[in-house]
Amino acid sequence: MNKLFAQVTGTAAKAAPVKVLPQAPATPPALARIFVRDLVVMATIGIYEHEKREAQRLRVNLDMMVLDRQGQRRDDIADVVSYEDGVKIVRDLAAQGHLNLVETFAETVAHRLLADPRVHSVTVRVEKLDVFPDAASAGIEITRQRG
């Protein structure tokens, strides 16, 4: 009864604070970089009438940070994210039909690459090579990541 009285009136001995030990920081996943450099494809892309009628050269660069296959050292393509998948995505999109903007092209490629759960982040650079006679290229570079 005295215990109950002490609890109700607040005169019970206070419990010692619980000591919380710091947790070790979570280990980030091991990542590897997969890339494709200077892939040139023909695409109908642009807002002007001549760009809607005639394909033009695009140069595409891809950088993908992917989960490393630590511990798995089989010499098997099924164990890795293949750069060939990125090339196929770019070629398929270029062949798909007209897009108005290189921004849309880059976003679409990034979205499709990130559909693979092993891909952590991607940088996509899309350049029109023949848009200005006095410039090597004009375009966009975006970086997107999972989450």
Image (cartoon, rainbow, N blue to C red):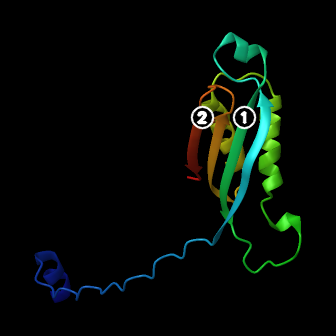
Q: The residue under label 1 is which amino acid type? A: Leu
Residue 111 locus on image (x, y percent): 66, 42
Relative vertical location of residue 13 with respect to residue 73 in this rendering, above or below? below
Total number of numbered discs in the rendering: 2
Determine the CA span between mark 1 and mark 2.
9 Å
Mark 1 residue element: strand
Determine whether, in the image, residue 70 is placed left or right of residue 15: right
Residue extending farthest right: 76
Residue 108 locus on image (x, y percent): 68, 37
Disc 1, disc 2: CB below 8 Å?
yes
Q: Which mark is residue 90?
A: none
Badge 2, how many Cα within 10 Å: few under 14, some, many 20+? some
Q: Nearer the viewer, residue 43 or 97?
A: 43
Relative vertical location of residue 4 with respect to residue 43 in this rendering, above or below? below
The residue carrying mark 2 is: 139
Relative vertical location of residue 91 with respect to residue 98 in this rendering, above or below? below
Determine whether, in the image, residue 57 is placed left or right of residue 122: right
Q: Nearer the viewer, residue 62 or 16?
A: 62
Residue 90 locus on image (x, y percent): 77, 40
The residue carrying mark 1 is: 58
Sequence order check: which comes first, mark 1 or mark 2?
1
Residue 2 location, quadrant = bottom left
Q: Nearer the viewer, residue 38 or 85?
A: 38
Q: Residue at x 15, y 85 (%)?
A: 12
Q: The residue under label 2 is which amino acid type? A: Gly
Mark 2 residue element: strand
